[in-house]
Image (cartoon, grey):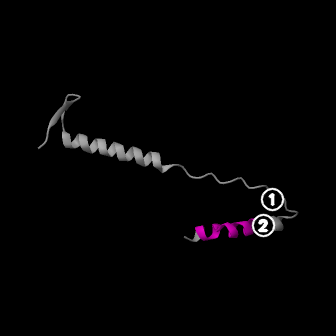
Amino acid sequence: MVVYYQIAGRKVGSHYLAMGVLGALFGGVKLAMGGGSQPKPATPPIQASSKDEEEFITDFLKQVNGDDKKKDH
């Protein structure tokens, strides 16, 4: 059985009100629990004596952190 309410000059069924309340509740919870992405920690500057050494260090750090694996997937 549906009960109709007069809202803003229109008849709205109780089932629509219930769905709206539940949608707003779960939508608000999802937004509140979603959070943001974690900021990356600042890395110290690389002080290499040559460009080749700097590239070697950055490639090594990418390999250790698994950045190459993330690109493949």
Where is residue 72 drawn, in percent x and y? 58, 71
Seen at 20% across and 28% down, the residue is 9
Seen at 65% across and 54% down, the residue is 40
Q: Residue furthest right?
A: 49
Q: Which residue is mark 1?
A: 46
| Secondary structure predominantly adopted by residues drawn in magenta | helix
Q: Residue furthest top?
A: 9
Seen at 85% across and 62% down, the residue is 48
Q: Secondary structure at mark 2?
A: helix
In depth, the one of 31 and 58 nearer the eye is 31
Q: Residue furthest left?
A: 1
Q: Is residue 56 left or right of residue 21?
A: right
Q: Which residue is mark 2?
A: 57
In depth, the one of 73 and 34 nearer the eye is 34
- Vertically, is 16 above or below 70? above
Where is residue 63 drawn, in percent x and y? 69, 70
- First in sequence: mark 1 vs mark 2: 1
Q: Is residue 60 left or right of residue 20?
A: right
Three-letter code, disc 1 = Ile
What range is drawn magenta here?
56-70
- Vertically, is 39 above or below 69? above
Do the residues bearing badges 1 and 2 touch, measured as CB atoms within 8 Å?
yes
